[in-house]
Amino acid sequence: MDISRVDLNLLVYLDVLLREKNVTKSANHLGITQPAMSNGLRRLRDLFGDPLLVRTSEGMTATERAQELQPLVRQVLAEIEKVVQARASFAASESQRVFRIMASDYAESCLMPRVLRRIRQEAPQVTLDVLTPSDVSFADVEQGRLDMAINRFDKIPQSFHQKTLWTEYFACLMNVRNPILKEPFTLDTYLAASHIWVSKTGFGVGVGVNPKDVQRLGWVDEALALMGRKRRISVFTRHYQVAMLLAEQHDLIATLPCRAAWLQRDNANLLVKVPPFDIPPFELKMAWSPLLQHNADHQWLRRLIVEVAQEVDEEFADFGRPFEPEQGIPVISRSDR
């Protein structure tokens, strides 16, 4: 076959078709009409001598030949993009690009407002679409349908590129009139209180929590379990902003990441204390597809996010230092500082 006679745009069509498995969605993704997309599929079938996508009871399904082609086509397009992008630059002030970022509720609260502020300063016509972990999957990231995932990851596919934005410790947020404050804040008084559980970091649709399944409750409860202790959880929520609001109730404690507690630093009804036991820190990371590694637009976004994270880290440093184990664990509250 004479490669000069092959329309390389067909490879772009094939890549999108095999991701979406839907002609209409593929056409919308590429910004072309459905008839044009259907014609592209017909030409692809002629080119490869295979139907590529066949209609089944579950919708359009990739043939064995199409499944073989998918990783090869992705690799070819990534290399072409690398060559093309080598001399290209991102004109931020003129761009009308839509960046889609998956951010956990914690990351969305602590990082994304500042990211948006910087984007509006440097690229006022750019649109930011922030999704939740329940909206996406690792496949969405891998296939480039999502520009970025910002979260704390237990496991991540080896093919992904990633960068740590900061290391996070934990703090206890509670009402200034919480009854337990009448006594020294120790592990025993902590466990005597009622608690707010908050977490939703993984991909996929969330499910109900079993309070007895410590292994699925996360860092705080696993740390207590290692000591043979358990806290009394009165409410489970998947939103850090909700947890911070609930902490204003006079008898509840929210044990949550320090930077989330930091957001309440001007709330006179709340104070922050160092947890009276050691909770392992975690890393907030951003991860992205190898397909986007050499994309100039994406490189600009990654640089901006890293710079904003560094700014947050610097502003947070004085507040967060007492919560770091290497600094000791002084039992202090914000009101003591």
Image (cartoon, rainbow, N blue to C red):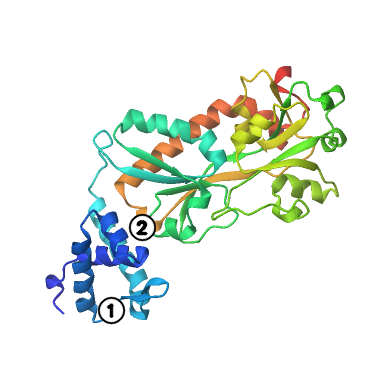
Is the residue under label 2 in contact with that under label 1 (CB below 8 Å)?
A: no
Tell me if residue 100 comes above or below residue 203 in the rendering: above
**Toward the viewer: 276 or 233?**
233
Please indicate whether residue 272 sits to the left or right of residue 85 in the image: right
Which numbered disc, 1 or 2, marks the residue closer to the eye? 1
Is 52 in front, or is 219?
Answer: 52
Give the quadrant of the N terminus.
bottom left
Which residue position is annotated with label 2?
291
Whether residue 127 can be seen here: yes
Residue 84's spot in the image, x, y percent?
Answer: 23, 54
Residue 161 picture quarter: bottom left
Note whether residue 337 is visible. no
- The residue that appears at 57% across and 57% down in the rendered structure is 155
Q: Secondary structure at mark 2?
A: helix
Q: Which mark is residue 51?
A: 1
Q: Amino acid at mark 2?
A: Leu
Tell me residue 203's x, y (percent). Answer: 54, 54
Q: Is residue 62 above or below residue 209?
A: below
